[in-house]
Image: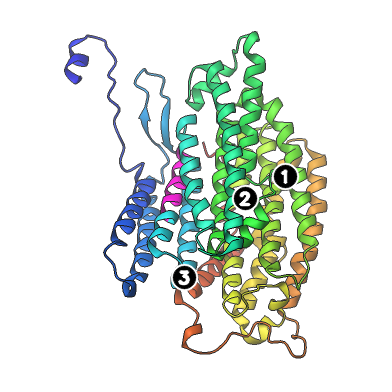
């Protein structure tokens, strides 16, 4: 085949080169997933924890390969016709999101090490690594086919992870709701993708952007329908209202580390895909997706915060349910800069990335403390956190810091600065009404975040043992769980002391 190409003068080569370093992060995660799955067949029950440490090592290796890629100038799987359209691009946007999702998967693994005794270890670690591989592939995808495949590789293992607690009715119900909603989202998105392909004749996002500028009049309605349906599909993935209904029950029914994973990594996957199709693929239809995303942002943050406000302290698993509704509200904030990009410039996307990085660190930290409390209080009620400072002062201080970051109050300076960048994006784009809606929602969120924070330092009621952990060797806190809390707390404090480490993303173009 190569000889034939060489023998024809002027013929374009059909052979694509592969930049193995560029694709190393998702490839390493996928390879370690397969290794763990095979090793599970030969490892005895006593040595099953080694699989978890192997998964952690694999994620650390995948993160390490991002360092030589930091220039953000690599692409691979490119067309050979001179169009410079590539299917995989390791630019700064891709690298930042890959760092976020692989870091989130690593912290999820730390939360899970030593706490998978009742779960099938081999399957658990394989599914987590496989999902992380898909999540790492998606932000670098630059054609619709790769984008959809990466999204499903990230999502399909997550269905199984949610329902991995065998014999648990709540876990099975959560997995079913998550699966059905995601299948519908995928079907709608694929219909939209097919419409876009029918009107442009290409899958590459840069080529789609060029051809959508010159769609024949008879195909304009089909192109608009494709854009809208694709956005609806991603709205499901990002848990934007009114497509958010699966979130609270899924988070409550899933193992707590997986709920943390979905709240951060799953959200990052959905938002990075949404950014790619809107800003890179559909810029000529900004008048369609811009107003739609602005309305979705306002609706999502309002629904999430109002629902979180209504959570009662004594309801079983109310702490996880509040974090679930809080994540819906935070999704609304993340949508604001994407909507603003339709009215101003692509640089507004940096505000979404900055906010996502802040949210990932502090939300994973909050889930880590929730996992600690759940070891002594399986009900994980908000009332179980009352007086936590008296028994676990460092955990209470960490949790209070994480909640204040989410609320945007000092000493959580990074949360405040991240919210300011989102406000600025809305105002600069002329979306004053959306900034007002966000301000109202921030005030609503302050109430339930501060109420939870105050409970941590309030004396427990007489006759209760809130925050008290059972003593004994069977109830020791795993070192990996402690490490996860420490890492997130240190990262949050560091970012609050030097917010420019993240906020510089809000001031530059990542593409």
Which badge, 2 or 3, is on the more N-terminal residue? Answer: 3
Q: CA distance from mark 2 to mark 3?
A: 23 Å
Q: CA distance from mark 3 to mark 1?
A: 34 Å
Which numbered tag is attached to residue 327? none
Q: What residue sits 61% from the left and 40% below the top?
A: 349
Pointer 2 residue: 177
Residue 375 occupies quadrant:
bottom right
Instruction: Give the camera-side residue of 204 and 94.
Output: 204
Pointer 3 residue: 118
Residue 223 occupies quadrant:
top right
- Mark 2: which secondary structure? helix
Q: Is residue 27 left or right of residue 364?
A: left
Mark 3 crowd level (few <14, some 14–19, many ≥20, 10 Å Cα): few
Which quadrant holds the N terminus? top left
- Mark 1: which secondary structure? loop
Which numbered tag is attached to residue 241? 1
Residue 8 point in image, percent of width and height = 21, 9
| Boundaries of the magenta span | 129-141
Would you say residue 187 sits in the magenta stretch?
no
Q: What residue sits 65% from the left and 72% below the top?
A: 380
Which badge, 2 or 1, is on the more N-terminal residue? Answer: 2
| Circles 3, 1 touching at the beta carbon (< 8 Å) | no
Mark 1 crowd level (few <14, some 14–19, many ≥20, 10 Å Cα): many
Residue 167 lies, with reference to residue 89, above or below; the image says below
Q: CA distance from mark 2 to mark 1?
A: 16 Å
């Amino acid at each position: 085949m190569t000889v034939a190409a060489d023998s024809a003068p002027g013929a374009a080569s059909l052979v694509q080169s592969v930049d193995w370093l560029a694709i190393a992060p998702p490839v390493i995660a996928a390879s370690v997933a397969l290794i763990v799955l095979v090793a599970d067949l030969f490892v005895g029950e006593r040595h099953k924890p080694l699989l978890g440490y192997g998964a952690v090592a694999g994620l650390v290796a995948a993160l390490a390969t991002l360092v030589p890629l930091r220039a953000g100038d690599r692409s691979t799987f490119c067309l050979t016709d001179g169009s410079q359209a590539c299917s995989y691009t390791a630019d700064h946007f891709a690298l930042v999101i890959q760092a976020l999702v692989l870091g989130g998967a690593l912290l999820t693994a730390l939360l899970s090490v030593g706490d998978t005794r009742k779960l099938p270890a081999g399957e658990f670690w394989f599914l987590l690594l496989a999902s992380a591989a898909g999540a790492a592939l998606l932000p670098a995808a630059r054609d619709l086919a790769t984008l959809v495949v990466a999204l499903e590789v990230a999502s399909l293992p997550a269905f199984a992870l949610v329902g991995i607690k065998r014999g648990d009715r709540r876990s099975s119900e959560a997995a079913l709701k998550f699966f059905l909603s995601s299948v519908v989202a995928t079907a709608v998105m694929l219909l939209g993708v097919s419409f876009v392909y029918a009107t442009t004749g290409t899958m590459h996002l840069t080529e789609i952007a060029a051809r959508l500028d010159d769609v024949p009049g008879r195909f304009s309605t089909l192109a608009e329908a494709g854009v809208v349906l694709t956005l609806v599909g991603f709205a499901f993935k990002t848990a934007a209202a009114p497509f958010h209904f699966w979130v609270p029950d899924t988070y409550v029914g899933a193992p707590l580390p997986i709920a943390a994973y979905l709240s951060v990594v799953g959200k990052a996957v959905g938002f990075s895909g949404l950014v790619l199709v809107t800003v890179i693929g559909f810029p000529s239809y900004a008048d369609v997706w811009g107003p739609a995303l602005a309305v979705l942002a306002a609706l999502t943050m309002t629904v999430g915060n109002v629902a979180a406000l209504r959570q009662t302290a004594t309801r079983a698993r109310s702490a996880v349910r509040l974090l679930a509704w809080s994540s819906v509200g935070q999704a609304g904030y993340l949508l604001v800069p994407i909507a603003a990009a339709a009215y101003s410039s692509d640089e507004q996307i940096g505000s979404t990335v900055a906010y996502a990085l802040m949210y990932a660190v502090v939300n994973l930290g909050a889930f880590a403390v929730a996992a600690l409390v759940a070891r002594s209080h399986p009900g994980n009620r908000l009332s179980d956190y009352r007086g936590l400072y008296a028994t676990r002062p460092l955990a209470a201080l960490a949790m209070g810091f994480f909640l204040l970051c989410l609320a945007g109050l000092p000493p959580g300076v990074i949360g405040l600065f991240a919210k300011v960048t989102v406000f600025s994006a809305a105002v600069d784009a002329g979306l004053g009404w959306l900034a007002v809606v966000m301000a109202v929602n921030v005030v609503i969120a302050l109430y339930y975040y501060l109420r939870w924070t105050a409970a941590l330092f309030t004396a427990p009621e007489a006759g209760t043992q809130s925050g008290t952990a059972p003593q004994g060797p069977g109830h020791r806190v795993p070192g990996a769980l402690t490490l996860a809390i420490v890492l997130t707390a240190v990262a949050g404090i560091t970012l609050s002391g030097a917010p420019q480490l993240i906020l510089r993303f809000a001031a530059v173009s990542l593409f």
